[in-house]
Image: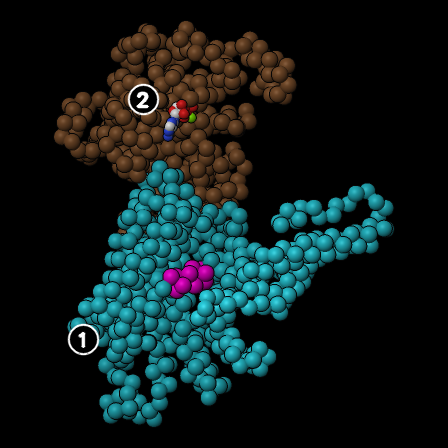
Amino acid sequence: MVAAAGKEAPTGGASARWESDPILSVEHLTMRFGGLVAVGDLSFNAGRGDITALIGPNGAGKTTVFNCVTGFYKPTEGRIVMRHGPGRQAETVEEVTNSGLRWKKEGDKGIFLLERMPDHEIAHRAKVARTFQNIRLFGGMTALENLLVAQHNPLVVASGFTVGGIFGLPSYRKAEQAAIEKAVYWLERTRLIDRADDPAADLPYGAQRRLEIARAMCTDPQLLCLDEPAAGLNPRESAELNELLKFIRDEHGTSVLLIEHDMGVVMEISDHIVVLDYGVKISDGDAETVRNDPNVIAAYLGVEEEEEIDIPEVLEDVSAAAGKAGTGKGGKA
Amino acid sequence: MASTRTDAPASDGKPAAEMPAQAAQGRLAASLKDAAVAAFLAGVLGFFFIGLRTDIEPGGLEITMRWTAWVVSILIVFGGRLALNLFVFRAQRPATGIVGAGLSGMGEALPGLGKWLMRGLFVFALVLPFFFMAAFPGKDRQFIDLAILILTYVMLGWGLNIVVGLAGLLDLGYVAFYAVGAYSFALLSQYFGFGFWMALPLAGILAAFWGIILGFPVLRLRGDYLAIVTLAFGEIIRVVLLNWYEFTGGPDGISGIPRPTFFGLEFSRGDDGFAAFFGLDYSPIHRFVYLYYIILALALITNVVTIRLRKLPIGRAWEALREDEIACRSLGINTRNTKLTAFSIGAMFGGFAGSFFATRQGFISPESFTFLESAIILAIVVLGGLGSQIGVVIAAIVTIGGIEMLRNLGFLTQIFGPGFDPVQYRMLIFGLAMVFIMVWKPRGLVSTREPSAVLKEKKRIGADMVAQGEGH
Ligand SMILES: Nc1ncnc2c1ncn2[C@@H]1O[C@H](COP(=O)(O)OP(=O)(O)O)[C@@H](O)[C@H]1O
Ligand SMILES: [Mg+2]
């Protein structure tokens, strides 16, 4: 990857993957809540096979962007393009946009205009999976069941839209066996196999985070959106999460869009970082570019929360201040 | 008055030996005082409501004092409050806790026993009519009829369980589909001469169709709104049936609904009847036995289908919907269709049960489909434990059997005088029983959930983890 040029132009380098082969393009996205502009005219790309991090202070609008991408909010303005198959496919994108259709799919290639699609179709057709900032598991169902629910759509077809399933067709049994195998695969990957038959609500916090990622992966996504997956994890779990995300990217070719406060995680695994502040993009590029961007430093110095600060001296200052205030909140260590 | 609960005596550092006696004394005194306060309040409040009675007289209202009733009510409040204080609020081991522990012990044992209990009940259900005929020759008709009634409610409970227990959508208007099923058959037979077996599938389909129609508007509603709108729909259907006189006969209802035939044979005395064909002596009991087996088969079908559905993707999606709708959508589940299938499949079983009801009664009118009916079915589901199949059976036997039992308590008239009719009090007793169970066992008799897929070891899931869904 080339060091990006500047903050205004989104990294001119021709070899930047997010420019030449973006899986997701967010174009002029605006989301207003009444008078509040949560996201204002935001444009960025996420490269196919990249881990793209979306960072920014609290309230910057990161979760709102996720909700627009995954269809939970209808954007006020803007276009969100999800691409299956290589390249920008610019002609098809224009064709679909002008045709008024929601998506177009031909073989492995496909163009999906996410702002036009309802949430469940985005997950089902456009193959975008997500996790939530506050974990949303099916607490009363076992870990295994959680992963089977994620494979709902292929299983419904295999069950002959339930009718065949009621009569116990052998083809459905085979499909269910395959679904259980896939669930077992992800349970092993996330070290949850021993807890497979325990209710999700019974798992420790870190395990719940991993299970949510496993569940999202069971939908066979092309793009995985993770909203603060490392929040509340201890350093060991955090390092494990890094490995898991790299595994997902490298072995499964799944692109990852990541919201994260933990700079350790972000700087280590991201191929591309987009920085938001007050709903506006203030920086965009690889880790090196963003780290040295004066805009980013300014935005982060303006914030009190210690997790969001990566510069050791500042961190010390902050924890000293917190100690004096008697809040008992220490630094990271 | 609930605040008195909190000032229960706490150990305040007295020598251990003195404590129990002193504490007990203090407790008694405090309890007496509290009960006296309650009795005083009851006296003040009850003076106008219980102590005075007004009757319309030619010259205006005439007031009579009812001192006995007033004093008795005060005494009841005093005694009740004292007992509650001594044994529950201020007791070291509250009686409710002991009973609750016993009940939950039962609840935990039930699932383990469940399999055997289910099998035992099943075998008993299979031979039940013959058992009754042999054991109670004089009363067999009455008992078989009661069994039919209970099974109808078991079936309705299982049907509603799909909507409320699995999908977590609180439906207070389930009786609407029961009515649709009953009226579908009655009208089809009246206008087109359909028999029971022809009309049964149609009634189910029509009810399912109405399930979808009523489901659509409530898709976006949550919580209390869902409950209220479904309740309104139940009433709308009943009011339409009541007022569309030309079509449904309004309050007069529909009579002369055909009885089910056995492969074309009627249960009549004639030469071409069931008894004559098989060379038996004619007896009206044959029809009851036949009806019994029909409802048993219908209920078993409901049960088997529900158990299978739970292990299919659609059933898992229902339960997932109950747990977290937003997460469902993030996984590509079309929650609208999922809710509609729950409504329509639940409604379909309600429709089957409805047309069975019509053929059993031979006469239906909107009066059979009031909100109370919905409430009883829902009570059966909730008492049994949301989502539990065996729980519904037990709850139906207890509730419906219990209500019917009250009809047989004739000896009570000897105590309370000839005017006393225990049936009049059934709703009061029913309500009290509900309150007690909900206090001690808020998640129903069988409150644990059985996972729908198992990798290594099947572990039951405690009620505290299972979400209840919308409107609870
Ligand atoms: N549904 C909503 N209604 C109104 N305001 C919202 C809504 N969702 C988010 N916001 C506002 O948008 C802004 C961005 O929030 P969010 O995207 O959650 O920030 P973050 O970057 O911390 O994830 C905040 O000011 C928040 O209050
Ligand atoms: Mg957020």
- Of residues B89 and B54, which is closer to you in this image? B54
Magenta: main secondary structure equals helix
In the displayed structure, B258 sits above or below B327; it is: below
> In terms of image quadrants, where is residue A108?
top left
* Element under disc 2: strand
Q: The residue marked by circle 1 belongs to what chain? A: B
- Nearest the camera: A23 or B33? B33
Residue B10 location, quadrant:
top right
Question: Does the image show residue B130?
Answer: no
Q: Is residue B167 left or right of residue B262?
A: right
Specify the colour of chain A.
brown
- Quadrant containing the C terminus of chain A is top right
Q: Nearer the viewer, residue B14 or A68?
A: B14
Chain B representation colour: cyan
Magenta-colored span: B371-381
| Circle 1 SS class | loop
Distance of mark 1 from mark 2, alpha carbons? 67 Å
Which mark lies nearer to you, 1 or 2? 1
Q: Residue at x 37, y 85 (%)?
A: B285
Q: Circle 2 is placed at which residue position?
A: A46
Q: Is residue B195 magenta?
A: no
Q: Residue at x 16, y 31 (%)?
A: A100
Identify the image quadrant of the N terminus of chain A: top left
Chain letter for the residue marked with disc 2 in the picture = A
Check the image and report above or below for A316 versus A119.
above
- Indicate which disc residue B193 carries: 1
Q: Is residue A32 left or right of residue B101?
A: left
Q: Is residue A232 above or below residue B118?
A: above
- Residue B213 locus on image (x, y percent): 25, 53
Task: Judge the density around disc 1: few (<14), some (14-19), many (≥20) Cα neighbours within 10 Å.
Answer: some
The residue type indicated by label 2 comes to: Ala
Q: Residue at x 41, y 78 (%)?
A: B145
